[in-house]
């Protein structure tokens, strides 16, 4: 009897969760795109990574941290040492204590991580109506089909369908769980001015910052692919040598 009651309760809970999910709206599958780093020989486009960093710096960094990237890492995406030093020095970072035991401000250095927009979680929530902007360091790894999901999310904002009521301060996005997201549309045409004269459309900026955040989540991707290719060549050569040795041994035995 108890088992039957428990089964009924579980079924009712499942139905209620399903009904809630249906009411919230079905999550749309991300748009599938072809990225330069796809495939065995794929690699990052350095110009795109630099544009993506610009979008992150001028748009995303106001709310989202990227704590695992240091200024010196920017040389890996095509910036020179001088450019990376200048980017670091454009920020003031906390340091100390000094000889008097006080904290002080100084220009950023190559060894410094990219600055966080908020001092702590409470400050971040207070500035965002209670929502906590996620750290973007591993965002493309933390989400299924990460690059496609991130790109689709940024271009997916729109008006809700008829009959769908948004919560206070929420925005409609079919690619986000529940179709409602606290983050306002982050991109708008012309939000940044690219130095290489690339037209800064919403889709272009979404592609560029997705590429940059994919690199930030796995900066060793290209090195890993090169190593994997070398390992495959080594294994093929060794396989050929073993086959030749086996044939020679068995030929002598016969």
Image (spheres, helix red, strand yellow):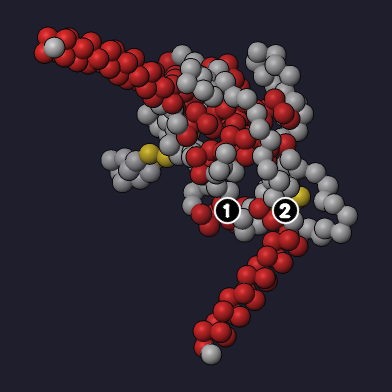
Question: Disc 2 and disc 1: Cα gap in Å?
Answer: 23 Å
Pick the front one: 215 or 35: 35
Q: Find out whether the residues at labels 2 and 1 contact each other: C-beta distance under 8 Å.
A: no
Left or right for 71, reference 62: left
Of the image marks 2 and 1, the number of the one nearer the N terminus? 2
Residue at left offset 31%, top offset 40%: 98
Single out the residue that lies furthest toward the bottom. Answer: 1
Give me the disc on residue 26. 2
Query: Is residue 246 visible from the viewing direction of this image?
Result: yes
Query: Is residue 169 visible from the viewing direction of this image?
Result: no
Q: Quadrant of the C terminus?
A: top left
Residue at left offset 74%, top offset 19%: 199
Single out the residue that lies furthest toward the left. Answer: 253
Crowding at mark 1 (Cα within 10 Å: few <14, some 14-19, many 20+): some
Left or right for 162, reference 97: right
In the displayed structure, 200 sits above or below 250; it is: below
Q: Position of residue 122 (x, y in %)?
A: 53, 57
In the displayed structure, 47 sits above or below 153; it is: above
Q: Position of residue 181 (x, y in %)?
A: 69, 51
Q: Position of residue 59 (x, y in %)?
A: 64, 34
Q: Which residue is mark 1?
A: 132
Single out the residue that lies furthest toward the front. Answer: 254
Q: Position of residue 236 (x, y in %)?
A: 32, 16
Where disc 1 sits, the SS reads: loop
Crowding at mark 2 (Cα within 10 Å: few <14, some 14-19, many 20+): some
Residue at left offset 70%, top offset 16%: 198
**How many numbered discs?**
2
Residue at left offset 72%, top offset 36%: 155
In the displayed structure, 146 sits above or below 220; it is: below
């Amino acid at each position: 009897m108890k088992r039957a009651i428990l089964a009924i309760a579980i079924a009712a809970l499942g139905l209620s969760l399903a009904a809630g999910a249906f009411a919230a709206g079905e999550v749309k599958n991300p748009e599938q795109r072809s990225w330069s780093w796809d495939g065995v020989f794929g690699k990052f486009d350095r110009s795109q990574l630099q544009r993506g960093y610009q979008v992150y710096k001028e748009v995303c960094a106001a709310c989202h941290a990227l704590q695992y990237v240091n200024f010196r890492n920017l040389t890996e995406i095509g910036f020179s040492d001088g450019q990376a030093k200048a980017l670091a020095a454009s920020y003031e970072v906390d340091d100390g204590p000094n000889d008097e035991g006080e904290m002080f401000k100084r220009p950023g250095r190559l060894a410094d991580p990219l600055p966080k927009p908020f001092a702590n979680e409470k400050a971040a929530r207070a500035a965002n109506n209670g929502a906590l902007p996620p750290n973007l360091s591993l965002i493309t790894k933390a989400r299924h089909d990460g690059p496609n999901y991130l790109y689709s999310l940024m271009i997916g904002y729109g008006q809700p369908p008829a009959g769908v009521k948004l919560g206070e301060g929420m925005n409609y996005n079919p690619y986000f769980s529940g179709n409602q997201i606290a983050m306002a549309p982050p991109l708008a045409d012309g939000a940044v001015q690219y130095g290489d004269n690339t037209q800064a459309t919403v889709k272009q900026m979404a592609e560029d910052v997705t590429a940059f955040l994919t690199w930030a989540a796995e900066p060793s991707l290209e090195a890993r692919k090169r190593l994997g290719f070398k390992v495959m060549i080594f294994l093929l050569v060794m396989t050929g040598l073993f086959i030749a040795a086996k044939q020679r041994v068995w030929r002598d035995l016969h």
